[in-house]
Amino acid sequence: MNIHFRERKTECIANSKQANKKANKSLKSFSAWLSTIVIVFCWFIITLGPVENRALPSPFEVIKAFVDLHNEGILWPSLAISIFRVVAGLLLGIAFALPAGILSGGSAIGETIINKPSHMIRSIPFPALAPLLIIFLGVDELMKIMLIAVGVFGPMYVNIRDGVRNIDPRLIELAKAYHIKKSTIFTTIFMRGTLANFMTGLRFSISVAWVALVTCETVNSSIGIGYILSRAQQFFRPDQMMACIIMYAIAGLGSEITANIFEYLLMPERRIS
């Protein structure tokens, strides 16, 4: 009887802890959105007055702008092509930055050849490169993707280079002493050692990619979030301007969630139970 009672008590305690854990997790998730809810509520309060007395559109006017863009048939194609441009430019920038950062951080010759030109490219405001890219690449998609890639290259290169420099050289010496294959050294020591810096660079690069998108989509674009924003500015449609800003915010949040998923999968030590 006593054994059964103790088992029942232990089970009740375990269930109570699990319920408390789920409640705390739900409360934490709600708290993360609390500031956003407050901002939207303040926005609603501020825009309660007549339309003639305010420049800021109300939330309901912005919702109507989304409906108008959807009925026009431009909303979802614009969002899709903008995401495609960001992803393509991000991948291309990483493809250039990854070997450059590894070579510059891992060898003196690589640093001599790569570091200074990379810093000069990183220091140039990427919108200033748009006219030059138009001359060489035209005004099609390649120019837009390349402009985003140039913006992405800087933060990715610096973080990967610093990540390689921070690897303990004794690990490499130990691996060589045990005659471990160079491919294993590269994947296990170099790639694993720079992963934290890579994720930091990825987050910065995602933000830069969305900023670069605004610049490239104002050049000979007939579709895209930047095109809608430029058109709304031209015809003074603040409701559509705010709709574009919200789309950028949602896309940026989605990008951050994607980066968190990659970090969760690639870096188990950072998982929070």
Image: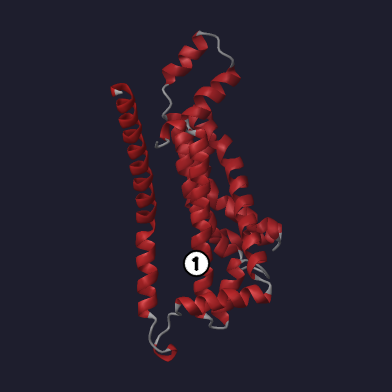
Q: Residue at x 56, y 72 (%)?
A: 229
How many labels, in total? 1
Which residue is at the far top? 178
Q: Residues within 10 Å of mark 1 (few under 14, many from 20)?
A: few
Q: Is residue 15 left or right of residue 186?
A: left
Amino acid type at circle 1 is Ile
Residue 125 percent across, percent down from the top left: 50, 57
**Figure colour scheme:** secondary structure
Task: Let me know if residue 100 appears in the view.
Answer: yes
Res. 181 image quadrant: top right
Q: Which residue sits at x=69%, y=56%?
A: 142
160 vs 206: above or below: above
Residue 100: x and y in percent read 56, 37
State left or right for residue 76 relative to residue 256: right
Q: Name the quarter where the C terminus is drawn.
A: top left
Which quarter of the rendered picture does the N terminus lie within? top left
Considering every residue shown, the one lying at the far left of the view is 2
Element type where label 1 sits in the image: helix
Which residue has dot 1 on it? 246
Q: Position of residue 218 (x, y in %)?
A: 60, 69
Vertical relation: 259 (above or below) 83: above
Closer-to-camera residue (9/52):
9
Q: Is residue 120 visible?
A: no
Residue at (46, 12) in percent of width and height = 174
